Amino acid sequence: ETGVTQSPTHLIKTRGQQVTLRCSSQSGHNTVSWYQQALGQGPQFIFQYYREEENGRGNFPPRFSGLQFPNYSSELNVNALELDDSALYLCASSSTSHSSYEQYFGPGTRLTVT
Amino acid sequence: LAKTTQPISMDSYEGQEVNITCSHNNIATNDYITWYQQFPSQGPRFIIQGYKTKVTNEVASLFIPADRKSSTLSLPRVSLSDTAVYYCLVGLLSGGSQGNLIFGKGTKLSVKP
């Protein structure tokens, strides 16, 4: 069974740029959620994708967008980067046949905006 | 989703039993209680989940009193590798649609030799 993987591991961008983060879900999982975790804080829910459509969104502006592909992998896109976007971005996959609280997280992508 | 309150940090020594209590006074009838563990620079990892009374797995036990307004995660005989942040989450399970997870700041457990 393959776990959740994310790429890249680390990324440095300049304010105003755009970034794309990628996530491959765990085998057999059809739902992907994205979280932002600032230093010293708990993860904050960005949005969730199920059947290639957004299925719930947290309190994040529209410049945070995503995609889910037929193989259930996913992308997180952030436009017009701001300094406060510097954080660990976590992807979590789950299956609709399991409890919604049993999500499996990847190792994250550390984004630094300068 | 019900708000949770946990201690910010706890210290322990190797071999001791650690109990982390979480308060969730506004828990709803259909809410479950779930705990996650997070090591530095890693994603959170599911530990245990329960609705009432006691749940035990190979990693931990979860104690939930009858009023369900609090819960206690019990880690038996901790080791240095149990040093991590522990999050308590409370919310509704739904098999069809997937709910999002609302994390607080968690409890930072430090295990000393």
Image: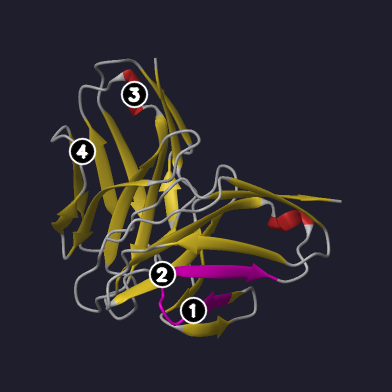
Instruction: Classify mark 2: residues with Cα within 10 Å, few (<14), some (14-19) or many (20+).
Output: some
Q: Name the residue rendered at 31%, 64% in the picture.
A: B26
Check contact, mark 2 vs mark 1: CB within 8 A: yes
- What residue is shown with label 2? B69
Q: Name the residue rendered at 34%, 15% in the picture.
A: A14
Instruction: Classify mark 4: residues with Cα within 10 Å, few (<14), some (14-19) or many (20+).
Output: few
Q: Quadrant of the C terminus of chain A?
A: top left
Chain designation of label 4: A
Instruction: Classify mark 3: residues with Cα within 10 Å, few (<14), some (14-19) or many (20+).
Output: few
- What residue is shown with label 3? A84
For the residue labelled by badge 1, is the local secondary structure a helix, a strand or a loop? loop
What whole-number distance in Å separates the C-alpha atoms at marks 3 and 1?
40 Å
Q: Is residue A59 magenta?
A: no
- Rendered position, A101 above or below A74: below
Q: Is residue B73 magenta?
A: yes
Q: Name the residue rendered at 39%, 52% in the picture.
A: B103
> Label 1 sits on what residue type?
Pro
Mark 4 or mark 2, whichever is nearer to me = 2
Q: Name the residue rendered at 87%, 51% in the picture.
A: B113
> Label 3 sits on what residue type?
Asp
Residue B1 % position (x, y): 27, 60
**Disc assigned to residue A60:** 4
For the residue labelled by badge 2, is the local secondary structure a helix, a strand or a loop? loop
What stretch of residues is rendered in magenta?
B62-75
What whole-number distance in Å separates the C-alpha atoms at marks 3 and 2?
35 Å
